[in-house]
Amino acid sequence: MQSKAATVEKYLGELPEDRRRALQAVRAVILKNLDRQFEECMSYGMIGYVVPHSVFPPGYHCNPAQPLPFAGLASQKNYMSIYLMACYGNDAQEKWLREAWARAGKKLDMGKCCIRFRKLEDLPLEVVGEAIRRVRADEYIRHYEAALTSNRRAAATRAAQKSASSRRPVKPKATSAKKPTANGRRAGKAAISMRRKR
C-alpha cells in the first residue's frame, strides 16, 4: 500500500501501534548502519533510503527525477517489508544474505529484493544491520552502472539480431507442376475425343 504521507514521521504516525513499533525498530537499525552518502526520505509511498541527486545526478534510470533507490521499509496490507536493492541482480550479496539469515535461525520470506515479515521477531536485526552496513554508496553506484551498461549492451545485441533476421532474403518457394484434378482429366479426355471425331 502506497502512502501519500509527505514525511517519514507522518507515515509512521498513520500506522497501527504494533506496526509502528516494528518499523521504528527496523528503521533505527538501518539508520545506525547506513553509509552517510545515502539519505532517508519518502519514496514510492514508503520510507526510502536513496542515493540523492547531489551524489548521483543521473538519478534512477526508470525515472531520472527520482533519486537512485537503495532500500525501503513499508507496511503492506498483510505484512511489512524491507526492500534491499543491493541484492537485486547481485548474486554475491544475495548469497551472503541468505546464508547469514539461515545462520541466525530465522525463516526468510524473500522475493528478488523484498523481505516480508509479519512481526519484529521474524527478523534477525543484526543481519539486517550488516546487510545495510556492508554496501557503501560508491560501491552501490558502481554495481548499478555496470548492471545498466550490461543490460543496454544485451538489448542492443538483441535488437541487432532481430534487425539482421528481418533483412535476410526470403527464398522463393519451389514450384511444382500441378497434378490435374479429376475434372481436368475429364476435360482433357473430352478434348482428345473431339479431335478424333474430326
Image (tube, rainbow, N blue to C red):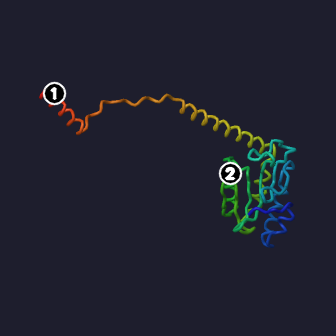
- Binning the other alpha carbons within 10 Å of mark 2 as few (below 14), some (14 to 19) or many (20 upward) gives some
Question: Residue 15 sits in which quadrant?
Answer: bottom right
| Above or below: residue 147 compared with residue 169 | below
Question: Residue, x 74% and y 40% (percent of image)?
Answer: 145
**Which circle marks residue 195 in the picture?**
1
Can you name the residue that lies furthest to the left here?
197
Amino acid identity at mark 2: Glu
Residue 147, x across and y down, in percent:
70, 41
Asked if residue 116 lies left or right of residue 189, the reply is right
Question: Residue, x 27% and y 34% (percent of image)?
Answer: 179
Residue 5, x across and y down, in percent:
83, 62
Give the structural element (helix, strand or loop) at label 2: helix
Q: Nearer the viewer, residue 5 or 198?
A: 198
Question: Residue, x 82% and y 48% (percent of image)?
Answer: 51
Asked if residue 189 lies left or right of residue 90, the reply is left
Question: Residue, x 87% and y 64% (percent of image)?
Answer: 9
Amino acid identity at mark 1: Arg
Q: Earlier in the sequence, mark 2 or mark 1?
A: 2
**Which circle marks residue 130 in the picture?**
none
**Which circle marks residue 94 in the picture?**
2
Q: Nearer the viewer, residue 192 or 62?
A: 192
